[in-house]
Image (cartoon, grey):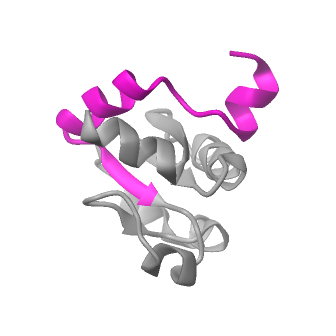
Amino acid sequence: MGFFSNLFGGGEPKQDIAELVKNGAFLVDVRSPGEFSSGTAKGAVNIPLDKIGNSLKRFEGKNHIIVFCRSGMRSGQAKSILNQNGFNNVTNGGPVTSVISALKK
């Protein structure tokens, strides 16, 4: 996967996401609360992109973190913020629909 698609979209392969979730990954929907309330992946928590920097404590001690949004753009930004703050166990899950689809398999 190219640099920009890895940073801003696309996400990881579906089978990797399903495996990570099976192994206890922390699922984080970085969309707005309104978007989150319209439906999300089972077990996901809502931490909007603009709140990631102030919510770093919520990520501490997590074995793996999967961030996702509507298209993969905001989750790419969230991954960058988390990486810059020392969280290297972060996967950009890309679009919420891809994460939901991966979890159904």
Question: Where residue 36 sits in the image (x, y, percent)?
Answer: 48, 74
* Quarter of the figure with the N terminus: top right
Picture residue at 48% right of the left edge, 41% below the top: 98
Question: Is residue 63 toward the left or the right of residue 79 in the image?
Answer: left
Please tell me whether residue 101 is drawn above or below residue 53 in the rendered image. above
Question: Where residue 30 sits in the image (x, y, percent)?
Answer: 55, 63
Q: Nearer the viewer, residue 99 or 53?
A: 99
On whether residue 86 falls in the magenta region, the answer is no
Question: Where residue 97 sits in the image (x, y, percent)?
Answer: 49, 49
Figure quadrant of residue 103: top left
Q: Nearer the viewer, residue 50 or 9?
A: 9
Picture residue at 20% right of the left edge, 41% below the top: 24
Q: Nearer the viewer, residue 53 or 69?
A: 69
Figure quadrant of residue 69: bottom right
Question: Is residue 32 toward the left or the right of residue 3 in the image?
Answer: left
Picture residue at 50% right of the left edge, 53% below the top: 96
Question: Is residue 22 toward the left or the right of residue 96 in the image?
Answer: left
Question: Where residue 49 sits in the image (x, y, percent)?
Answer: 63, 66
Please tell me whether residue 66 is drawn above or below residue 34 in the rendered image. above
Magenta range: 1-28
> Number of labelled discs?
0
On whether residue 6 falls in the magenta region, the answer is yes
* Quarter of the figure with the C terminus: top left
Please tell me whether residue 64 is drawn above or below residue 5 in the rendered image. below
Please tell me whether residue 58 is drawn above or below residue 78 in the rendered image. below
